Amino acid sequence: MKLFDVYPVNDITIVKANGSAVWDDKGQEYLDLYGGHAVISIGHTHPHYVQRLTDQLSKIGFYSNSIHVPQQQELAAKLGKVSGKDDYQLFLCNSGAEANENALKLASFHNGKKKVIAFRKAFHGRTSLAVAATDNPKIVAPVNETDNVLFLPWVDLDALEIAFQTHAISSVIIEGIQGVGGINVASAAFLQKIRSLCDEHNAVFIADSVQCGYGRSGKFFSHDHAGVQADIYSMAKGMGNGFPIGGILISPKFKAVYGMLGTTFGGNHLACAAALAVLEVMENENLIANAEALGNYLMDELRKFPQVREVRGKGLMIGIDLPEELSHVRKELLFKHHIFTGEAKPNVIRLLPSLALQKAQADQFLAAFKQVLENAQQPA
């Protein structure tokens, strides 16, 4: 049997990892500034994380939600404390797409309405309704198509007002910082307007925090920079540092009903152990503050390069917008300087490293980036 070939892959096989370093099967070390799509939040194979999972696995790895799983309540308490959302409720699932799917469904249960506002360049996942709210027709199958999702221009207050006047809106789903879309930051004024319109029209504000949440922006949720409270926060990626887990934080105004939401694997013992380890390390090592400080440093330094069109982001979620003639930079960083970064089309390099990234590693990247840009200016 062959694999279903849907991933364009680099010809690299990673066999070992530690912190922000990974090694391939030939012994070559790489600096990881992408963390497997923003998943590695506290660093690869962090000893506390490994110990937490090992200890849990030696006791019980899984049972279903038909019995008490004390680790779920422990996780809810810790998550409430670290996020500052103590009065919210937690529903655990397995992925970001599933988190957004449940958020959109819960919103519709709550107000009985169908229309969803999403935004141009949005990415919310690949499952049925999550992909329908994703602005990429190539990954929306005919069976996923629906007229219940309205795509509005990014940060357009007038278009937002008109949509609420014209339609019975169930929910607005928005990434505080668009990831796949190119590291586009939602303005505080725009997020505040969404909050006020949702309040006025009995709609639900869904803060998609799958990539931009969990401390990456320098606050626990990137939407917190706007000083607003969403009704539902969706989470995944950095939540388990590589162990599959997702969840939604749900405002106290939502009433739970048996059977409303459900999952087989969500909130299992191992997943909770992984998520608890992440929060404990984040707290003990002050990683949110590190993300803010190191992110500011990197963005300040990157803005000094005249070849860079724009640097966008917050904390350790950074987009470097390059002109077409520098479209080769990401590949050169990987294959010549052994540094993993990500991309967003057409020519944006995405930096999504561990929140435990060190300044020396940031400087290593900046030196390599400078060398690549200098070499690009030299005549062939």
Image (cartoon, grey):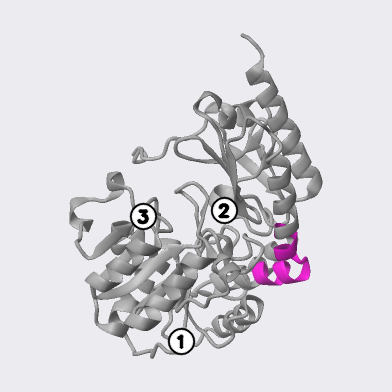
The reply to whether dot 1 and dot 3 touch (C-beta < 8 Å) is: no
Gap between marks 2 and 1, in whole Å? 32 Å
- Residue 334 vs residue 102: left or right? right
- Specify whether residue 286 is painted magenta: yes
Q: How many marks?
A: 3
Please tell me which residue is depicted at 37% across the width and 69% down the height of the picture.
Answer: 172
Residue 301, image x, y percentages: 73, 42
- Residue 22 vs residue 113: left or right? right
- Residue 234 vs residue 134: left or right? right
Q: Residue furthest front?
A: 158
The foreground one among 209 and 228 is: 228
Q: Say if 66 sits above or below 377 in the image.
A: below
Q: Say if 54 sits above or below 24 in the image.
A: below
Q: Amino acid at mark 3?
A: Pro
Q: Label 3 belongs to which residue? A: 153
Crowdedness near tag 2: few (<14), some (14–19) or many (≥20) residues, C-alpha within 10 Å: many
- Specify whether residue 351 is painted magenta: no
Q: Label 2 belongs to which residue? A: 38
Secondary structure predominantly adopted by residues drawn in magenta:
helix
Q: Which label sits in the foreground, 2 or 3?
A: 3
Q: Earlier in the sequence, mark 2 or mark 1?
A: 2
Gap between marks 2 and 3, in whole Å? 25 Å
Label for residue 67?
1
Magenta-tinted stretch: 277-291
